[in-house]
């Protein structure tokens, strides 16, 4: 791989057929989440939220790693409370931006996804991993408990396996990540792009309005008690039924034809 230059963009964007791919482009640093990279991601996601042509986002990384977490060199270069607070606040905003984005987000994972990189995978709505991918929350090994990655991890997998990852810092295989529910699919390395693209295309073919309604409802109801969740979900279903896309989808199904979505 050619050595990166100062003029290389740290985040790449590609739009094709309604699928926007955002690629972390710091391969020399294992795509570590510098403050600038997190800000670039948040800026692009904010723009995507308002872009009607973007139906789904794929998060990817260049080089041998998906993302190795925070940029430790950057953190140690300015060891002040203000700098640390700014970094972790930016990370929290980024993760919440992904969750609240009214469009599905798929993580395409190769190599390692560790610490905040594992947090990115846990935060994404879906994840496809190469067979050789590995995952960890290894902060405990360097005296820095992965507290912010913990927030996403404990919402993606069970408490006991999450605690084991957090307390040991051990790498787990893609197969084990799949068993735990951290990733949806594990495929041969050579099939990673194809499998991610196929999943993205199947989802992007749905009504964008329905996807937005469903994603928001999924995360909101998960934080409610059972009674409140059903009240909320019933209201969402009613609102969804009143949408033009729902009427179109049902009519298309009954008449055995493909629906023509309008996003309304």
Image (cartoon, grey):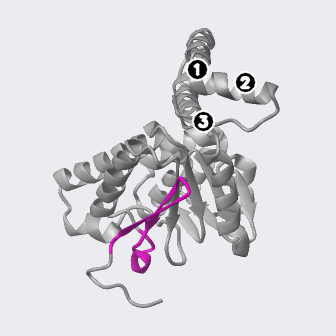
User: Is residue 115 something one can see in this rendering?
Assistant: no
Magenta residues (range) = 9-31
Q: Is residue 244 magenta?
A: no
- State yes or no: discs 2 and 3 in contact (Cβ < 8 Å): no
Asked if residue 25 lies in the magenta stretch, the reply is yes
Query: Circle 2 — which element?
Result: helix
Q: Nearer the N terminus, badge 2 or badge 3? A: 2
For label 1, the SS is helix
For disc 1, the neighbor class at 10 Å (few under 14, some 14 to 19, many from 20) is some
- Location of residue 137 with respect to 160 vertically, above or below: below
Residue linked to disc 2: 250
How many circles with numbers are drawn on the protein?
3
Mark 3: which secondary structure?
Answer: loop
Q: Is residue 74 visible?
A: yes
Q: Position of residue 218 (x, y in %)?
A: 58, 29
Measuring 58% from the left and 9% from the top, which residue is drawn there? 231
Q: Which residue is mark 1?
A: 240
Give me the residue at 56% from left, 40% from top: 154
- Count neighbours of disc 2 (C-alpha within 10 A) and say few if under 14, some if 14 to 19, many if 20 or more: few
């Amino acid at each position: 791989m050619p050595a990166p230059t100062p003029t290389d963009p740290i985040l790449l964007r590609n739009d094709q057929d309604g699928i926007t791919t955002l690629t972390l482009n710091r391969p020399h640093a294992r795509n570590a989440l510098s403050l600038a990279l997190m800000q670039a991601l948040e800026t692009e996601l904010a723009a995507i939220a308002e872009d009607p042509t973007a139906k789904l986002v794929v998060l990817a990384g260049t080089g041998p790693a998906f993302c190795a977490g925070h940029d430790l060199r950057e953190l140690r270069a300015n060891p002040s409370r203000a700098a640390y607070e700014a970094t972790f606040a930016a990370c929290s905003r980024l993760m919440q931006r992904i969750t609240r984005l009214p469009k599905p987000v798929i993580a395409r994972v190769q190599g390692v996804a560790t610490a905040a990189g594992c947090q990115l995978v846990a935060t994404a709505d879906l994840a496809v991993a190469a067979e050789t991918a590995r995952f960890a929350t290894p902060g405990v090994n360097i005296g820095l408990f992965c507290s912010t990655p913990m927030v996403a991890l404990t919402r993606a997998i069970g408490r006991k396996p999450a605690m084991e990852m957090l307390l040991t810092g051990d790498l787990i295989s893609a197969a084990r990540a799949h068993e735990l529910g951290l990733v949806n699919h594990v495929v041969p390395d050579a099939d990673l792009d194809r499998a991610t693209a196929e999943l993205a295309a199947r989802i992007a073919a749905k009504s964008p309005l329905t996807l937005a309604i469903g994603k928001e409802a999924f995360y909101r109801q998960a934080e409610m008690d059972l009674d409140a969740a059903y009240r909320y979900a019933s209201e969402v279903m009613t609102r969804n039924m009143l949408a033009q896309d729902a009427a179109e989808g049902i009519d298309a199904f009954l008449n055995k034809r493909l629906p023509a979505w309008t996003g309304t």
